[in-house]
Amino acid sequence: MGSSRFAFFVILLLCTCSASPPNFVLLFADDLGFGDLGCYGHPSSLTPNLDRLAAEGLRFTDFYSTCPVCSPSRASLLTGRYQTRSGIYPGVLYPGSIGGLPLNETTIAEVLKPLGYATAAIGKWHLGLGHNGMFLPTKQGFDHFLGIPYSHDMGPCKNLTCFPPDVKCYGLCDINTVTVPLMQNEVIKQQPVNFLDLERSYSDFAANFITTSVEKKQPFFLYYPSHHTHYPQYAGIGAAGRSLRGPFGDSLLEFDNTVGHLMATLERTGVINNTLVFFTSDNGPELMRMSRGGNAGPLKCGKGTTYEGGMREPAIAYWPGIIKPGVTHEMASTLDILPTLARLAGAKLPPVMLDGVDMTDILVKQGKSKREAMMFYPVDPSEKYGLFAVRLGKYKAHFYTQGAFHSSTTPDKDCPETAVLKAHNPPLIFDLEADPCEHYALPVDTPDIQTVLEQIKSVKEQFESSMVFGESQVGKGTDPNLRPCCNPECSPKPSCCHC
């Protein structure tokens, strides 16, 4: 073992075995495309703090979410398990959803709590509210929660101010439901939420959480799933009108400003060298919103699809003195975050089937990934169709393809919802190293590709034989009485839910 490699392992051992376990800050953007950040090649995005993390940390080129929409991808991130196991499918949860992330699923917060970690979730939860708040973060291992329990477009956006001085949110959104609430733990703090002050509230809350944890000499896990850059975008006075990309760019800049504030807090409190900061996004860009929907860079299609643009995400890992600056082309996923943080903290893994693998070797050594394959389920997975696509090494095979309304307006005919479900036998196969755009399917009649296809089919069959679909939580439907209201006895609803 080389001296530098040995030094890294010594440092890692000290961090995981000393009286000061590492802290974790997990930043999760919303609907941010592979090509939206300056450090991923966007010419006019203003993201100096994320760009700094990328320059001084490890930037991933082949990092994946598990689903091209919000709720399922969040479930996988927090549990290290495909959404089909936990039942967060098809699609997403709504304000009155009866179901949510099952309480018998183990989140990252619950993995870390036995080791004395302070835990906080700040921002967009979107894993259920349920009866009496039974699915909120405080029921899933988090000590603190400040945020919106679902997506911020699930309210009457046209009645809300999202840009100063009085610019209304674009879009009608879900006009027949309650206005969007801001919750602290299990109590509604504000309804409707004031979008102009929301990011500052999140940023201050997160900074205070870090500061308090350090003062108590308590290791911490901060999960910050941002609403940015999901449509309709919003921004306060610190970012509105300050980017070159209009409302989308302003929203992204406001998120980046929060990243800067958190990094400054880590430095000020003296724990930055003992903190892993990890950034990624939940799914690809909502191309139907055009310039307000994000950018997938060179990748095909976007949100709602199992093409690369829907599920390959920007990702950055930053840990001074532990993670060397660089770029990795190793395959990794949001699934891998739970087992990685558990390894670094010295925590026990939950006694269930995990789909994630430990990526410590990638982070510490810029070594090889333990992940051999990535599975691609559609928004509405079923046992009948199974996996839509499988990536094995550099090859990706599509067994089914389908467009999505989230990816409409693009000139690519494969992206919009008019591109109906299509089976491929033999599958479409692409070399993602030579053709990340998925433009040029390889000929399947050559011996080499035949061998690859057989390997992929074997991996697919083995994986699907191990998959037990959990009961669909989204399929449980909705109950209007579960929609959050700060004045639950008021009438008439939803207009009276205001405080």
Image: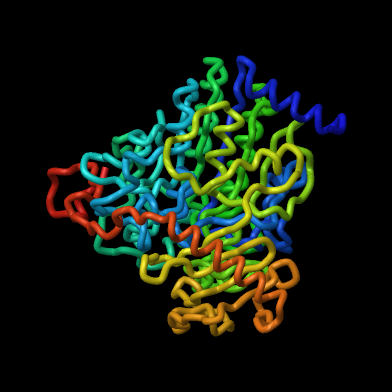
Residue lying farthest right? 3
Residue visible at 59% across and 78% down? 428
Number of marks in the image? 0
How far across and down, in percent of the image, does residue 89 sit?
A: 36, 59
Q: Is residue 197 visible?
A: no
Can the viewer see residue 62 in this picture?
Answer: yes
* Quarter of the image with the C terminus in it: top left
- Coordinates of residue 488 in the picture (x, y in percent): 17, 43
- 302 shown above or below 71: below
Render colour scheme: rainbow
Q: Is residue 417 above or below residue 56?
A: below
Q: Which quadrant would residue 261 be assigned to in this image?
A: top right
Camera-nearest residue between 288 and 319: 319
Q: Quadrant of the N terminus?
A: top right
Residue 371 on image: x %, y %: 62, 51
Q: Residue at x 45, y 26 (%)?
A: 113
440 to the left or right of 101: right
Q: Nearer the viewer, residue 443 or 108?
A: 443
Residue beneath the point at 50% across and 73% down:
407
Q: Is residue 133 above or below residue 251?
A: above
Q: Residue at x 77, y 46 (%)?
A: 55
> Which of the 4 quarters of the picture holds residue 172?
bottom left
Image coordinates of residue 46 in percent, x first then y, are 68, 54
Question: Which residue is nearer to you in this view: 206 or 450?
Answer: 450
